[in-house]
Image (tube, rainbow, N blue to C red):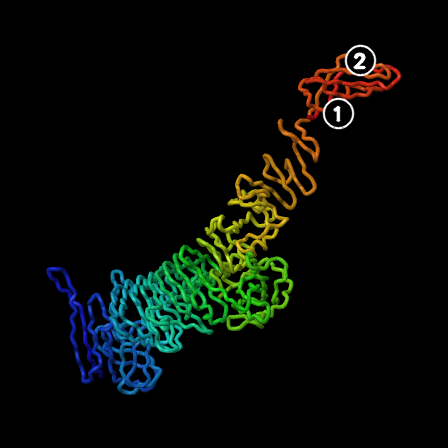
């Protein structure tokens, strides 16, 4: 036996001269003796369902005094169906109120009496009521749909309106219909359950329902200790517009405003964390135990592989939570949005839980604001974007933006701190962790985020002199504050603490990274970590950005390019980073230290394979020399990577094309070549290392071809006389001549081409001279004078024939 009362509304169509209009009609039907109890709502055929029309309450006579499985008889009003997979009713009035899940019965939502079966946890003496657990919203969602036939399909269609007001939901609200629109405009859904408040789709199969639209949903958490989202999605092509929350009771938070399980065409447009009007409206929990994001996609990939488009967001957390945590392994695009005031990070994404996708930011504004001390891990800063593997693309806007911690402020000496993590894979890249301004005395507490996969940690320090280029540790030097520290001895609750007593630094050798750690958190604007602790550089995140600026953290170091940018600004807070920059944010006239274009030709240890590739080039302004234009082989590449903007001073063992003369005027440039071993020239050869035509080494200049000085040019050896020609000539004596004893004789012979400027440096006679001596002189143009002298006591014969000689001028 039950008694009910209820006001019903329905829509009818009226046809007038102006067209078709909707007419809202209502009546109140009272049955039984007790007012305030509801009669079954009619089975409405109206296209639009109002949640308030489907609120119902009944007072069954069935005995619920013993907790357990029960079946009660009720009026099965519109939307009350016993075979609904996720349908709850509220038992109240007597005993402890509870929302129970309907597991069976014979209610068919046709307005006739039927049964509901459920299991209670508390006793409910006579006088209890059974009714809607959502103020009629769940029932309206059920009533709004229909199941198509020919062929039969899944439930779909409908439009549900939640009128302005506060609707109490004591159990999860389940939306299980495709092509459904739910308009929450003006309403607030109070979530009194320790569970997801609104669940879109089916928990097990995301492909059952699609094209579901939620308009202006606004939630308020009333369940203390709840760790579930306001809205959870496991459907396809879900559209959610203008979601927001309001402050509930103390200790009641959502795990996120929106959690996307598996929706590969998800749209979130216009989420706003500030609609509540004060800091208490942010709605998520953030403390040392958990610091939740506003939007999450937890993954893992292949189970929950969400693809999301997030736009027009206003995430302003005022230091009371994080922005977006997208871990599904598929792509997410965030555009035209504000993400600011976050406690730890603005965006975290990647392939940590599997997948191949990345994150794209288009015209996103980020700002930490005054939240530098709000990170519940301690004084460890904030991250604008954390990429755990995968790709990051940033277009326009003012993002990513994080905050680097400062550990002391007692003086002007500028310390920069770095952490190197060690695991079974080897050593990590030195990761920039923060700075301190000190007077040089006292202890400095350096707090850094935990690297969970590390076995030991090293804390390194360098001092930045005023006006000096930022220089991270590289090679061998006095860098170590502490080395080989067991992680477990300094790390707990997500943070690691070191004490720098400002004693003398110890010697340290920075190794090439072979350990690429997973970073759940690290401070910086753009943090590029790996998707797992690994020795594989392909597990590390990379970024493609319009402009790369300060605060980039990468685990790759010298191993591979981490950032590709169109422009490179003056960079501070430098982690050793291989950044490939095509241009520069500043013109050369205003910024001398232009960012380097770092290009690898191929791997050093290539086993002799992949030979004869074409080269890669880039040029820019030169300025005053000397310097390098192209560093062909960097003899200290670790130094280059560890230097801000990748532009350290050059080294003697570099191979380069450069300029050793220049005053800033392009016409005054003198090009130079340098190499640590040799410089070789080739003609008609691929450069095989053997068939060079000219080679310069440290000890000699070698030629493998004849050397010719072009006519009109000169050759000067040392401090000697410039020579313009050296040539062998031939003079012919046709008849033999005799020179008397103790006498000399001159013989003139024609020599075509010989000039009076020629000097004869040597002559070869036509035959043996015996006691004769011979000298030669140029006595006139094209004529040589042969001067024979006989030192003997008898006459000597001059040989006839050809006399050759070398003439120099």
The reply to whether residue 4 is in sight is yes
Point 34% across, 81% down: residue? 120
Label 1 secondary element: strand
Residue situated in front as seen by the camera: 141 or 216: 216
Percent of width and height locating residue 401: 44, 61
Position of the C terminus by quadrant: top right
Q: How many marks?
A: 2
In-image side of 303 versus 797 (left or right): left
Tell me the distance, in whole angstroms, between the alpha carbons under discs 2 and 1.
22 Å
Percent of width and height locating residue 330: 42, 59
Give the labeled residue for mark 1: 762
Point 56% across, 43% down: residue? 662
Residue situated in front as seen by the camera: 213 or 778: 778
Asked if residue 708 is positioned above or below residue 337 in the image, the reply reads: above
Residue situated in front as seen by the camera: 463 or 704: 463
In-image side of 740 versus 46 (left or right): right
In-image side of 782 versus 245 (left or right): right
In-image side of 240 versus 649 (left or right): left
- Kindly indicate the quadrant of the structure image that contains residue 202: bottom left
Mark linked to residue 737: 2
């Amino acid at each position: 036996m039950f008694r009910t009362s209820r006001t019903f509304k329905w829509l009818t169509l009226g046809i007038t001269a102006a067209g078709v209009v909707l007419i809202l009609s209502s009546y109140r039907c009272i049955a039984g003796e007790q007012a305030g109890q509801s009669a079954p709502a009619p089975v409405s055929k109206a296209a639009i369902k109002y949640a308030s029309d489907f609120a119902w309450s009944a007072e069954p006579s069935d005995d619920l005094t013993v907790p357990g499985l029960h079946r009660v008889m009720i009026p099965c009003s519109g939307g009350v169906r016993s075979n609904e997979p996720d349908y709850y009713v509220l038992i109240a009035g007597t005993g402890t109120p509870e929302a129970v899940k309907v597991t069976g019965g014979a209610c068919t939502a046709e307005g006739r009496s039927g049964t509901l079966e459920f299991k209670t946890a508390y006793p409910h003496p006579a006088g209890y009521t059974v009714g809607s657990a959502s103020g009629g919203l769940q029932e309206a969602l059920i009533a709004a749909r229909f199941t198509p036939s020919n062929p039969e399909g899944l439930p779909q269609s409908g439009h549900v309106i939640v009128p302005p007001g506060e609707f109490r939901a004591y159990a999860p609200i389940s939306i299980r219909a495709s092509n459904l629109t739910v308009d929450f405009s003006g309403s607030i859904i109070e979530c009194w359950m320790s569970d997801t408040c609104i669940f879109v789709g089916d928990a097990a199969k995301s492909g059952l329902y699609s094209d579901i639209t939620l308009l202006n949903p606004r939630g308020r958490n009333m369940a203390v200790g709840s760790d579930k989202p306001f809205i959870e999605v496991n459907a396809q092509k879900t559209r959610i517009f203008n979601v927001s929350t309001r402050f509930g009771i103390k200790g009641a938070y959502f795990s996120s405003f929106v959690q996307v399980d598996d929706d590969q065409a998800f749209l979130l447009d216009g989420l706003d964390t500030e609609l509540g009007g004060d800091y208490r409206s942010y709605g998520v929990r953030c403390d040392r135990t958990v610091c939740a994001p506003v939007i999450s996609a937890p993954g893992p990939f292949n189970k929950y592989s969400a693809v999301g488009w997030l736009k027009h967001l206003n995430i302003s957390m005022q230091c009371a939570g994080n922005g977006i945590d997208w871990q599904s392994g598929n792509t997410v695009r965030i555009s035209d949005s504000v993400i600011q005031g976050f406690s730890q990070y603005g965006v975290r994404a990647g392939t940590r839980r599997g997948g191949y996708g990345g994150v794209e930011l288009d015209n996103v504004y980020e700002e930490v604001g005054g939240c530098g001390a709000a990170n519940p891990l301690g004084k460890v800063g904030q991250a604008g974007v954390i990429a755990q593997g995968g790709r990051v693309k940033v277009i326009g806007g003012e993002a990513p933006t994080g905050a680097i911690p400062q550990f002391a402020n007692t003086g002007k000496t500028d310390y920069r701190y770095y952490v190197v993590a060690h695991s079974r894979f080897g050593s990590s890249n030195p990761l920039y962790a923060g700075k301190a301004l000190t007077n040089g005395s006292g202890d400095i507490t350096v707090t850094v985020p935990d690297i969970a996969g590390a076995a030991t940690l090293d804390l390194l320090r360098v001092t930045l002199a005023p006006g000096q280029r930022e220089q991270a540790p590289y090679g061998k030097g006095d860098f170590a504050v502490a080395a080989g520290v067991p992680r477990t001895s300094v790390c707990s609750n997500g943070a690691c603490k070191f004490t720098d007593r400002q004693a003398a630094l110890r010697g340290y050798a920075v190794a090439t990274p072979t350990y690429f750690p997973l970073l759940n958190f690290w401070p910086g604007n753009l943090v590029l970590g790996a998707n797992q602790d690994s020795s594989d550089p392909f597990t590390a995140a990379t970024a493609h950005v319009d402009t790369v600026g300060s605060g980039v953290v990468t685990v790759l170091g010298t191993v591979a390019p981490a950032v590709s940018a169109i422009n490179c600004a003056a960079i501070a807070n430098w982690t050793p980073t291989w950044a490939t920059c095509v241009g520069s944010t500043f013109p050369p006239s205003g910024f001398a230290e232009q960012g380097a274009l770092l290009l690898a030709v191929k791997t050093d240890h290539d086993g002799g394979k992949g030979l004869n590739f074409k080269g890669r080039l880039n040029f820019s302004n030169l300025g005053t020399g000397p310097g390098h234009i192209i560093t062909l082989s960097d003899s200290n590449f670790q130094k280059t990577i560890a230097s801000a903007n990748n532009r350290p001073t050059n080294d003697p063992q570099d191979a380069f094309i450069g300029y050793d003369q220049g005053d800033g005027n392009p016409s005054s440039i003198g090009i130079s070549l340098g190499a640590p071993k040799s410089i070789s020239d080739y003609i008609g050869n691929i450069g095989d290392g053997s068939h060079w035509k000219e080679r310069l080494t440290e000890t000699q200049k070698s030629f493998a071809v004849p050397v010719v000085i072009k006519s009109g040019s000169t050759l000067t050896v040392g401090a000697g006389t410039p020579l313009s020609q050296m040539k062998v000539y031939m003079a012919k004596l046709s008849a033999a001549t005799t020179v008397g004893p103790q006498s000399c004789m001159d013989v003139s012979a024609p020599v075509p081409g010989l000039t009076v400027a020629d000097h004869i440096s040597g002559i070869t006679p036509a035959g043996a001279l015996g006691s004769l001596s011979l000298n030669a002189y140029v006595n006139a143009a094209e004529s040589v004078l042969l001067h024979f002298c006989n030192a003997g006591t008898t006459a000597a014969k001059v040989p006839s024939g050809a006399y050759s000689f070398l003439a120099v001028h």
